[in-house]
Image: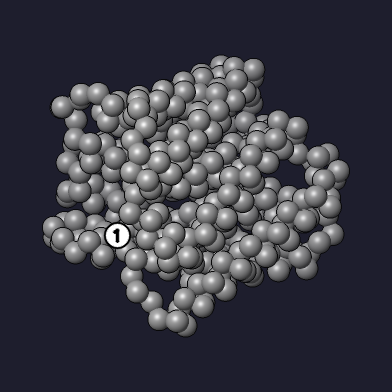
Amino acid sequence: MSTFLSKWLSISFLNLFLVAFLGLILRYKIAFYLPFLNQKYILHSHSHFAFSGWITQSLMVLLIYYLSSKIGEQVFEKYRPVLYANLICSYGMLISFIIQGYGLLSISFSTLSILVTSVFTIYFWADLKWIKKKATSILWFKAALVFGIISSIGALSLSYLMANKTTDQNWYLASIYFFLHFQYNGWFLFAGMGLLTDKLEFLIHEQKKLNAIFYLFFFACIPAYFLSILWIPFNVIIYQILILAVILQLIAWAIMLNIFFKNSRAISKKFSSQGKSILILSAIAFTIKLLLQSGSIHPALSQLSYGFRPIIIGYLHLVLLGVTSIFIIGYIISFKLIITNKLAIKGIIVFIAGIIINELLLMTQGVAALSYIAIPYINEMLLVAAMILFIGTITISLGISRSIQ
């Protein structure tokens, strides 16, 4: 067990606990009275820290570990300052957004975070050249890095609009969704698929199919952004490209699922049983995400979904918690990248249960909102779901800390 990996992943799980804590505060403030905290400021802190302190930090650590397995553990020293810098920026955003929302400090830390990501991209891209075998996973990693940099355009644009108090709603939403799309459909998805593909291509003989999956997702990623801004009128050609992007993604995922089913026995031998079960849940969430995304291509459904906040929040949580967070945890558990005990496993089960309950409540609230039906005590129930998530994360952190002592 690598000390480097154990240390940094335990920090990531601590950050996940802080994300859940902020989520709990947000839900409490909606359900009850908490006047001394600004709702928007907490929300900005919660979202920025979730992206940078939890998901990006974890993916960076896992990608560095991937490099170490290919070219040696000397890479740890090279990337250690980058991880510390990302951590400082993440905690800087966590605190400054709570204090001032979008202001000088928070925008400065956000900008520094982009610079840190850029340094990581330059380092990692250069180090990939030392890997002699040109595997499909390398294509996924390079695309992930590129999409991560592209997403920063949305973040910088949003910071500019907020700092200048621009009130144009279309530009504001387009910037937010640009950042979100190229983060979770670009950087998060492609980095995760790269890690998964790296394991698969040494287990199975499906190289052509794995290559096809990459290119289908890659060519669909950029046009798929327009699925996030369907309230803007498009001409027929762009709309047809959107339909093509949706079809490409569905075909790619169908091929991936076929690979899993066809090679389930070989995969089961390499992946731990607990980890495999968690990854299956992530795959189910990703399937639901693709189907919902495909449905949004219909203009009437698109107008409805973007008009109701619970649906947007439910979709974002599905991607960030149901797909990405569960995948990261499942990958770590599958290959025993950190020492876990019964307490940590119980925490993971509680955390995943919280995700499922949270999603069911958000989707129920969203569907009810379409008919303008108010669900009694829905905010209190969502607070309970947030509490379950919080309990799960603190239990995971406690279990991990006891294991590495």
**Which residue type carries mark 1?**
Leu
Residue drawn where x is 50% and y is 40% of the image: 321
Residue at the spot of label 1: 173
Q: Position of residue 396 (x, y in %)?
A: 53, 24
Residue at x-position 46% and y-position 41%: 363
Q: Nearer the viewer, residue 190 or 62?
A: 190
Q: Quadrant of residue 291?
A: bottom right
Question: Residue, x 56% and y 19% (percent of image)?
Answer: 399
Q: Is residue 140 above or below residue 285?
A: below
- For this view, does 384 lie left or right of residue 343? left
Please tell me in which quadrant of the rendered image residue 96 appears.
Answer: top left
Rendered location of residue 199, percent (x, y): 73, 50
Q: Is residue 342 at all visible to an observer of this figure?
A: yes
**Looking at the image, which is closer to me, 197 or 90?**
197
Residue 154 vs residue 260: left or right? left
Q: Can you see residue 7?
A: no
Q: Where does residue 123 sit, x and y in percent of width and height?
A: 50, 59
Q: Is residue 220 left or right of residue 267?
A: left
Asked which quadrant contains residue 18, the reply is top left
Secondary structure category for the residue under label 1: helix
What is the total number of numbered labels drawn onto the structure image? Answer: 1
